[in-house]
């Protein structure tokens, strides 16, 4: 068990919906800044934003105090990814590694493009469908360099260390061997997922080839360095909220009572009737009702 928990505010699939994270003491924290990047030696924490097979585009709200998870909005409407044949929603548990940041001022030497201004993304390929706001421990296997509208948008491939088959996965070649076609499907999904919205296909560095575990970890470490510069005010985040409760060298650190006051000013916690649908049938039922 990670010791972290989550709390929903307002109903899912509304503009007001938020998922706040708490530490083992039940105190509100930022999933962006307060959850350590490392869970153990060579094991990273992952914040699950989108459960596999679901369609709602949920993400850490980098500009909101305490950075809760909320549904992305465009032109006043909640965003959903389309079902791209033959896929249903996201084809992995999708989320981010905390305490990382793809600096939009840094021109990446590998891609020639600047960062996308978000924590680094993770595609978790294990068998369990995780819950939104769940904090899991993952083993990094490789990475894909996507170019999204001219920005570098790294996609880390990882597996939950608690997955029954985790011991069999140690590098990207293990994914190729044990899940044939999965990496090709990942590239295809990322290439086309914005096309239904009228946007062009995404591009990739390295001819859409996945780089190995060591390369991926080096990229993650570099984004951790950019995050540290951000949270210690050595870099101007230009609107990113760096409020945190645990980063002692950060001028943005606040006490738990201040964090609690921010959350309590929002709509009340979601009642049991607001249970998050994660499988296909529940999701469609929720949309119809």
Image (cartoon, rainbow, N blue to C red):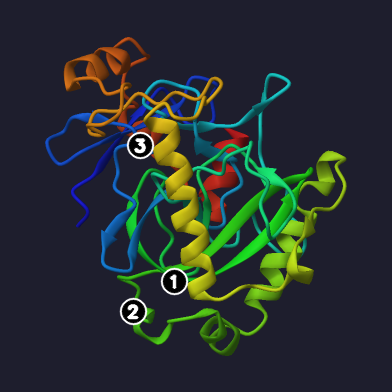
Q: How far across and down, in percent of the image, does residue 19 sit?
A: 39, 32
Q: Which mark is residue 164?
A: 2
**Residue furthest bottom in the image:** 177
- Give the residue at the far front of this rendering: 234
Residue closer to the observer: 254 or 103: 103
Is residue 288 shown above or below 99? above
Q: Nearer the viewer, mark 2 or mark 3?
A: 3
Q: Quadrant of the C terminus?
A: top right
The reply to whether callout 2 and callout 1 are in contact (CB within 8 Å) is yes
Of residues 163 and 60, the one nearer the viewer is 60
Residue at 85% over, 42% down:
199
- The correct choice, above or below, for 282 with respect to 184 in the image is above
Mark 1 or mark 2, which is nearer the start of the sequence? 1
Tell which circle, 2 or 3, labels the residue nearer the N-terminal end.
3
User: How far is disc 2 from disc 3 in space, using C-alphas?
Assistant: 30 Å
Judge the density around disc 2: few (<14), some (14-19), many (≥20) Cα neighbours within 10 Å: few
Q: Which residue is mark 1?
A: 127
Which-is-in-front pick, marks 3 and 1?
A: 3
Q: Which quadrant does the N terminus fall into?
A: bottom left
Q: Identify the residue at horizontal 66%, vertical 40% (top origin).
A: 80
Q: Which residue is mark 3?
A: 33
Q: Is residue 124 left or right of residue 29?
A: right
Q: Secondary structure at mark 1?
A: loop
Q: How many marks?
A: 3
Residue 148 vertical placement versus 274 (above, below): below
In this view, the residue in front, 16 or 188, is 188
207 vs 56, nearest the viewer: 207
Confirm whether residue 64 shows in the render: yes
């Amino acid at each position: 068990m990670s010791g972290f928990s989550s709390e929903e505010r307002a109903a899912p699939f509304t503009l007001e919906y938020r998922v706040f994270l708490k530490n083992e003491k039940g105190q509100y924290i930022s999933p962006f800044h307060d959850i350590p990047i490392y869970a153990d030696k060579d094991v990273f924490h992952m914040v699950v934003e989108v459960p596999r097979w679901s369609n709602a585009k949920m993400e850490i709200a980098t500009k909101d105090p305490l950075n809760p998870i909320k549904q992305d909005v465009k032109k006043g409407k909640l965003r959903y990814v389309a079902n791209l044949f033959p896929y249903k929603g996201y084809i992995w548990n999708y989320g981010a590694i905390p305490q990382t940041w793809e600096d939009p001022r840094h021109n990446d030497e590998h891609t020639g493009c600047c960062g996308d201004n978000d924590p680094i993304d993770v595609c978790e390929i294990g068998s369990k469908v995780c819950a939104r706001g769940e904090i899991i421990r993952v083993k990094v296997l490789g990475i894909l360099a996507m170019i999204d509208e001219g920005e570098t948008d790294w996609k880390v491939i990882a597996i939950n260390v608690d997955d029954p088959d985790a011991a069999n996965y140690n590098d990207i070649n293990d994914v190729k061997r044990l899940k044939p076609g999965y990496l090709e499907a990942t590239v295809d999904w990322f290439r086309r997922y914005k096309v239904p919205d009228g946007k062009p296909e995404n591009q990739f560095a390295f001819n859409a080839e996945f780089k190995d575990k060591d390369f991926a970890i080096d990229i993650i470490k570099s984004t951790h360095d950019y995050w540290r510069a951000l949270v210690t005010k050595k870099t101007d985040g230009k609107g990113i909220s760096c409020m945190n409760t645990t980063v002692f060298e950060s001028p943005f650190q606040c006490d738990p009572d201040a964090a609690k006051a921010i959350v309590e000013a929002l709509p009340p916690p979601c009642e049991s009737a607001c249970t998050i649908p994660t499988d296909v049938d529940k999701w469609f039922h929720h949309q119809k009702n």
